[in-house]
Amino acid sequence: MSKNKKIFLALFIIFMLVMLWIGYDISRRTTFPGSKGNLKERISTEAETEKK
């Protein structure tokens, strides 16, 4: 393998590791929208529409 291919491969591996780390960090800090439970605003608007 030539020197240029080795440098490209090394940079590609470093880039992919950084991207995986960023993705893991973001996913650890955020929650799935469906797991938030019932918010007061959502409960009040659902109750109002059921009454009508």
Image (tube, helix red, strand yellow):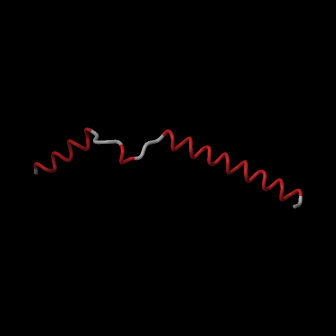
Please provide percent x and percent y for residue 6: 84, 55
Taking depth in this image into account, of 29 and 52 the one nearest to the observer is 29
Of all residues, the one furthest to the right in this rendering is: 2
Q: Position of residue 3 (x, y in %)?
A: 89, 56
Relative side of 48 to 33, left or right: left
Q: Nearer the viewer, residue 36 or 47?
A: 36
On screen, residue 15 versus residue 6, left or right, reads: left
Number of labels in the image equals 0
User: Residue 36 at what x, y percent from top left?
Assistant: 35, 42
| Residue 30: x %, y % from top left | 47, 41
In this picture, residue 29 sits left or right of residue 32: right
Residue at 78% of width from left, 55% of height from top? 9
Q: Residue at x 43, y 43 (%)?
A: 31
Q: Image point 51% across, 44% down: which residue?
A: 27
**In screen coordinates, is 11 left or right of 41?**
right
Q: Residue at x 41, y 46 (%)?
A: 32
Residue with the most extreme bottom position: 1
Q: Quadrant of the N terminus?
A: bottom right
Q: Quadrant of residue 40?
A: top left
**Residue projecting furthest to the front:** 1
